[in-house]
Image (tube, rainbow, N blue to C red):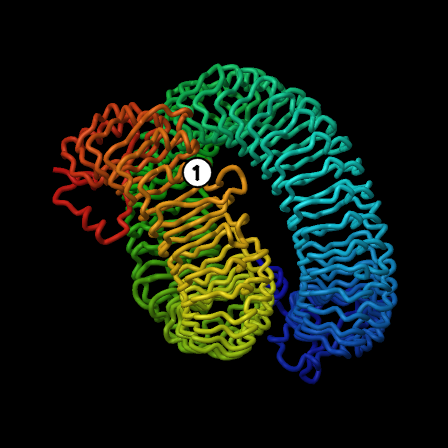
Amino acid sequence: MGSFRRSVLEALPLVLLLILSVRGEPTFKCAENYCEFVVNEQLLGGDVQAYKFNLSAEYGTVEVQFEKSLVSIVPPSLFDDNGRKVDTLVMREVDVQRVDADTFTKAVALKSLQMHRNRIPKLFNRMFRNATNLRRINFGGNRIDAVEEYTFQGLANLSVIRLSRNKIPVLPRKLFAGLSSLTSLLLDHNRILELPEGIFEDLTILDELYLSFNFLERLTRNSFKGLVELDNLALHNNRISTIEPDTFASLATLQYLTLGSNRLTSLAPETFIAQTKLAKLDLSVNQLAELPKDLFRYTTALKELKMSNNSLKELHSDLFANTVKLEDLVISHNEVESLDAALFRNLRKLEMLLLENNNIGHIFPGTFDALQSLRALDLNQNGIMTIEGGLFRALRVLDKLFLQNNLISMVSGDSLEGAVQLTELYLNKNPLQSIDDDFLRIPSLMALAMDFCGLKTLPKGLLAKQQSLKLLFLEGNKLTDLDPDLFAPLVELEELDLSANLLYNISNALANLTSLKLLDLSDNRLRSLQDNAFANMTTLKKLNLKQNKLTEIPRALAKLPNLSTLTLETNKIKSTVVGEPLANLEDLYMGENEITKLRLNDFPAVEELYVERNQIHSLSVDTFVGNRKLKTVDLTDNRLTGPLEGIFTPLRKLVTLTLSGNPLGRVTRATFEGLLKLEDLTLRNIKLTELTGAPFASLSELEKLDLSENRLAAVDEASVRGIGKLREFYINDNEIGIDGLSGLNILNRVQTVSLSNQSIVVPDTLLANKSWMVEFYVQGGTFASLPAQFFRSTIALEKLSLSDNKQLVKLPKDFFQYVPYLEELVLLNNSLSVLEPGVFDPLGLLRELDISENPLKSLPDGLFAQTFLLESLRMADANLTTLPAGIFDKLYVLAKLDLANNQLRMLPEGVFNRLYSLETLSLENNQLEALQPDLFKSLEKLNIVILSHNKLAAIDPQLFAGLPVTAIDLSYNRLTTFDESAMAFAGRLLMLSLESNNLTTLKIHSTLEKLFIDDNKLSSIEVKLEDSYSHITSLSVVRNNFTALDAFYQFKMLTELDASYNAFTELNLAKLFNEIVPLYTLNVSNSFVERVQFGKIEHTPTLVHLDISNNNLTALDVRAFAVFRQLQNFVFGGNRFDTFVVEDLLRAFDDLQTIGLEGTVWKCDFLKSLKASMEEADVTFAYKEKETLHERLESVCSKQLYDICCV
């Protein structure tokens, strides 16, 4: 719940406090030193300037607080009549819309003024001229876009100013002149572009200065002149690209400095020469490519240094020579390739070193020897191939070691030598092929993770010394069975994850894990469990057996006396009977099974029951009699028919009930009788045609009701009688038009209403009493307009959607005047052809706006002039032919802009110049023929650009110069040749799509990782090598002119290759996999292949998906393909053979999951026999998506079995 909504709207039903009526004018009295008033201007009416305040405390001053109020100004009487008494005024979140130059003229006693989170737009010169006792001022979170130069003049005693989260673009030169007592100044989250020189020169005792989240571009020697006592300076999240060398020279007392998330490319060696007391420095998320070796020479007190997310490739060996007190060092997400052996030589106090996501392939033993205090070392996601040679030999207090996502293939007993106190070790996603029995000689380990390492077995003695291990993660490996001796030493193990393996049987290998509390065996191939599988697991509380092949609930579960959560979803279980009660089971998940009848006698303590997507066709009156503790029941998508009267009556504690997707037909009051605590009821798609007899009358605690996807024609008052506490009401997608919504009239505490249909009639007074409303969605309305007062009661509305209404052609300029706190607005697919200038001006907090699919054609100047906080703007399918110059100039924080599917032929010069935060831009499907070289020059955060479906015949090489673009889509244009390596973005681009152009030549840079060039005329790809090899990992060349696989041999890192619809004739797979070792997906279908050559493959292939379908092969030599032992999906239909040896196929591939046979007309008897053998091996058929009409027609045949043609 938003804080504004809490503070304002909870008060609306309350009687106003301390109010008398004198000549019709509201008068508020208080005789205490603390006075709290509840003032609702909307309810009181009249002129707020006439409100009277009588403060009559006998002695001392008075603190005045407006709580749960709505008041547009500071009532003049407050200070006119009590100016010598009020020392504190709190008007936080009460919707104050302005203060005037004379508002505080008589506030002579005022010391603390808290006006944050209102709608104040401006502060005036000398507005506090008589309030000279002021100590603290807080105008944070308003909509201030102008602060006059002498606003604070005369406030010599002022110590705190908070102006955070406003829209201030300019700080006048004399704004803080004379504020010699100021210690705290917060200016963060504004729109400040520059700091006038000397602006802070009078602030000689200022302790903290927050300027973060602005748009500062440069810092000069006079930016912080005068701040001789400054302790904390926050400059992160600006646009700073330049810092003059002596910028911080006067800040000798500085201890905390944040410069993260700026545009720094370099720093002078003397930048921090005066910061001898600096304790924390943040330089992360900049563009620093190198650091001077003397940069930290004088920061000898530094304890925390962050340099992550830069472009650092190497670090000088003397860089940290003087930072001897450093405790935390973060260098993650850079491009560091190696570490000098002397780099950390003086960091004896370092406790945390983060180096993840760099390019470190090898670390010399001894590099970490000086780090005697190191407790956490993160080397995740580098290219480390070995950890041998005593790498950690001196790290005797190391506690956590992260080695995930590297290339480590072998670990020995010496790998962790020296790390004698290691408690957490993470080796996930390493291609471990060799693990010594004594690898884990350290007895202190408490957490071990080796997920997704390709492990088929584990050494029998691997865990022999791990008596202290509590967490063991082995998810996503290829274990088929478990050795009981392996787990025997794990007497303290509490969590074990064996999910996503290939386990067929666990026997009793885990039975003696007597301390285990959580066991995950999901996504394996278990068909049954022997009765003693969990014999001694008396402490097990959570067991996950989801997505196995179980046909019944294993009786082994009865041996688990403390089991509280059981997950059996996505199996083939037909009955809920165990045979013995699970006395302490509280949460039971059995969705997506084959249960036909619900029997719950074995679960007397169950509180959460999920049996969605089964085949339950009926419930008896005693179904839940023995389950009175139930709080949640989900019966979604079964076969239940209504009205289910009396079925749920025993469930007095039920809180959530979901019956969606059942053909109930009707419900009555008796359906829900007795559900005294029900809060959440979902009845989507249950074929309701009417609500008669007040079916929900007994549900006095109901807070959420979903009646979507039914056939209701009306929701009248009788329908919803008794549910006065309802907060959320959804009535979407009913099959006939909802003409009556009178039931909403009595739901005056509702916060969310969602209505959708082809023809909803929205009453003019629908929201008249909805003062709690936060979200309102109408899809498919039939109104051409709404009354000016429609939203008058919904000031706290945060999300509004009015979509799919073809009658809605215009929005009055004042349409949004009563919803000033709106954060999300959707006006999708209406008939808006004109938007009035200023229509969005009241929406100063708007973050997301969608006006797509309206016939706008053009936009007025200044349309977004006041929507300063907009982060996402969609204007797709709006028939736009032009964009006004400057239309986006106020949208400094916009991150996503969608202009797809318009008719833009050109873009005005500088149209994107102020979109400093833009990350994603879509110009797809317009009429663009050319782009100016400097069009995107100011988009310094631009990451993804979609330019597909235009008419571009060429791209200027300087188009994205200096921008961090990583993905560009240029598909469906008119390019005939493309040299990505000559583009300014070469070296940064990771993904490029050039599909459906007319390319005959292509050259790329070696750093590109994903390339999509389907539907061109290419027969080769040229690579400009910066490294010794191309970084391409994913390549799609469908429907080109390639004739041999050797065109792809240069892509040594390739993991996915789709070369279908080319012309290969012959495939030399041995050569391909010797050249491209990591390839795991290969598609060469529809390519006229007649022969496949095999030979010696030097490394074990990692291929998991192979598609050779629709070629000209005359036989399937399964034994030859058996070299791909890890194959999971094999598609080979549509060739010139109609039989193969089933047993050979299933025996050849240990991990086989699917086979694809489409394209061939098989013998039906062969398919039947094949199906039986496949079921035994847990293999299923794979089916291709038919993309074209031709493919769909080709798949039609006279007879099918398992959706495969046969005779």
Image x and y of residue 878, in percent: 42, 70
- Report the number of discs: 1
Residue at 56% x, 19% y is 412
Estimate the x, y position of residue 636 in percent, counting from the top left: 35, 47
Position of the C terminus, as image quadrant, is: top left
Residue 531 seen? yes
Q: Quadrant of residue 720?
A: bottom left
Whether residue 801 is visible: no
User: Who is closer to the viewer here, 1027 or 325?
Assistant: 1027
Decide if residue 891 is on the left or right side of residue 238. Answer: left
Circle 1 Cα neighbour tier, 10 Å, few/some/many (<14 / 14–19 / ≥20): some
Rendered position, 436 above or below 636 = above
Front one among 21 and 824: 824
Which kind of residue does numbered mark 1 sit on? Gln
Q: Residue, x 86% and y 60% (percent of image)?
A: 226
x and y, in percent, of residue 500 in the image: 42, 31
Query: What is the quadrant of the N terminus in the image?
Result: bottom right
Q: Where does the image place residue 599, in percent across and percent down from the top left?
A: 34, 36
Which residue extends farthest bottom? 23
Q: Check disc 1 and report the residue beneath it.
A: 1050
Q: Nearer the viewer, residue 622 or 863?
A: 863
Which secondary structure, mark 1? loop
Left or right of residue 747: residue 1194? left
Nearer-the-camera pick, 186 or 880? 880
Q: Is residue 505 above or below residue 670?
A: above
